């Protein structure tokens, strides 16, 4: 079955899969999703331990109790032997798999086929484990970002990263002297955003590495939302609330959006209307409707979470 279109995930918090303390603490995080990591945050010598801990964690938090916080797992790249072993976590019915170092949509298709079989074997509802590729971590991937449309109904979003691609390109840094991303990484970001939009899935911005710089994160997250991203990766619990605020419509946005919808509703059949001295047309109406839909979706998710908590 094809899963219903999901409410955007504003924040996805990485949690090392082999850290009992961090896994336990993450339950209290306001992150919309946790990414239980089996890749970069775990030493290769501990990956087998992390798999067991992540599976146990998933099984201790069944889907019926995850209304306020989804549980995703970042596995190792499909090009490594560890990837198939990592997919033992399917038995815990994660909400999704974050797939690193993809070259193209073909990797998503391959993972989707694995999940088709594993869901049946493990008795997990078919088609419900979604996929978010980290779509810019190899040189080849930069030439394939427009090819994800309709590759799989499991595709839920696309995110990007600037660290692994820098290493693959032989760069000593991915930043310019002024601190901004160099050209190729700005290109990767833009193509990921456009590729996600073309595929009709959520664009998720990459991490902000300096977790102690709250002001810098706030500015970075706001800029990402203005560009079109609808969520962001977090690497530290203190980043989550800042990210959630940045990707939630403000009271002013909601008020203005309602007025835009109302003025178009009062003038049926018109393609352009005036409001407060501004001329508005269909793109303004669509954006206003999108804002109101987001607010309603976030409220519904919060209400569902309250129901689960009080049950």
Image: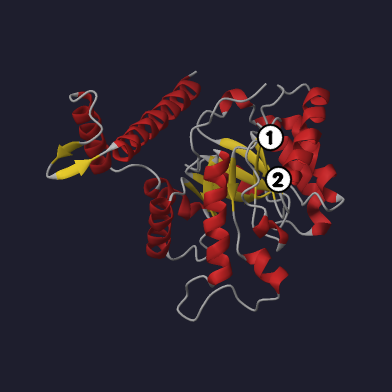
The answer to whether residue 206 of the structure is visible from this angle is: no
User: Where does the N terminus fall, quadrant-wise?
Assistant: top right
Residue found at the far left of this picture: 277
Q: How is the image coloured?
A: secondary structure
Q: Nearer the viewer, residue 166 or 213?
A: 166
Q: Position of residue 281 (x, y in %)?
A: 26, 38
- Look at the picture and state if 107 lies above or below 296: below
Residue found at the far bottom of this picture: 177
The label shown at residue 152 is: 1
Q: Position of residue 104 (x, y in %)?
A: 71, 50
Q: Position of residue 87 (x, y in %)?
A: 79, 39
Disc 2 from disc 1: Cα separation: 9 Å
Q: Nearer the viewer, residue 96 or 131?
A: 131
Residue wearing tag 2: 105
Check whether the beta carbons of the residues at disc 2 and disc 1 lie within 8 A of each other. yes
**Helix, strand or loop under label 1:** loop
Circle 2 residues within 10 Å: few <14, some 14–19, many ≥20: many
């Amino acid at each position: 079955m094809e899963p219903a279109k999901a409410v955007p995930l504003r924040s996805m918090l990485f949690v090392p899969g082999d850290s009992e303390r961090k896994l336990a603490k993450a339950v209290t995080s306001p992150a919309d999703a946790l990414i239980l990591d089996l890749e970069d945050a775990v030493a290769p010598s501990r990956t087998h331990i992390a798999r067991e801990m992540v599976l146990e964690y998933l099984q201790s938090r069944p889907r019926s109790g995850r209304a306020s916080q989804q549980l995703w797992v970042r596995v190792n790249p499909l090009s490594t032997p560890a990837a198939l072993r990592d997919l033992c976590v399917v038995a815990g019915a994660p909400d999704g798999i974050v797939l690193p170092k993809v070259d193209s949509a073909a990797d998503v298709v391959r993972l989707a086929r694995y999940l088709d079989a594993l869901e049946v074997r493990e008795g997990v509802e078919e088609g419900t484990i979604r996929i978010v590729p980290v779509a810019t971590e190899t040189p080849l991937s930069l030439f394939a970002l427009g090819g994800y449309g309709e590759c799989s109904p499991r595709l839920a979003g696309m995110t990007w990263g600037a660290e692994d691609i820098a290493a693959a390109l032989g760069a000593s840094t991915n930043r310019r002297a002024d601190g901004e991303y160099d050209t190729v990484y700005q290109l990767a970001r833009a193509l990921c955003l456009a590729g996600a939009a073309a595929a009709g899935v959520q664009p998720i911005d990459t991490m902000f590495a300096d977790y102690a710089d709250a002001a810098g994160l706030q500015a970075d997250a706001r800029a990402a939302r203005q560009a079109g991203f609808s969520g962001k990766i977090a690497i530290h619990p203190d980043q989550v609330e800042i990210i959630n605020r940045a990707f939630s419509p403000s009271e002013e946005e909601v008020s203005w959006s309602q007025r835009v919808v109302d003025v178009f509703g009062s003038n049926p059949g018109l393609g352009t209307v005036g409001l407060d001295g501004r001329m508005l047309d269909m793109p303004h109406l669509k954006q206003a409707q999108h804002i109101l839909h987001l607010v309603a979706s976030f409220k519904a998710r919060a209400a569902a979470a309250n129901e689960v908590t009080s049950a």
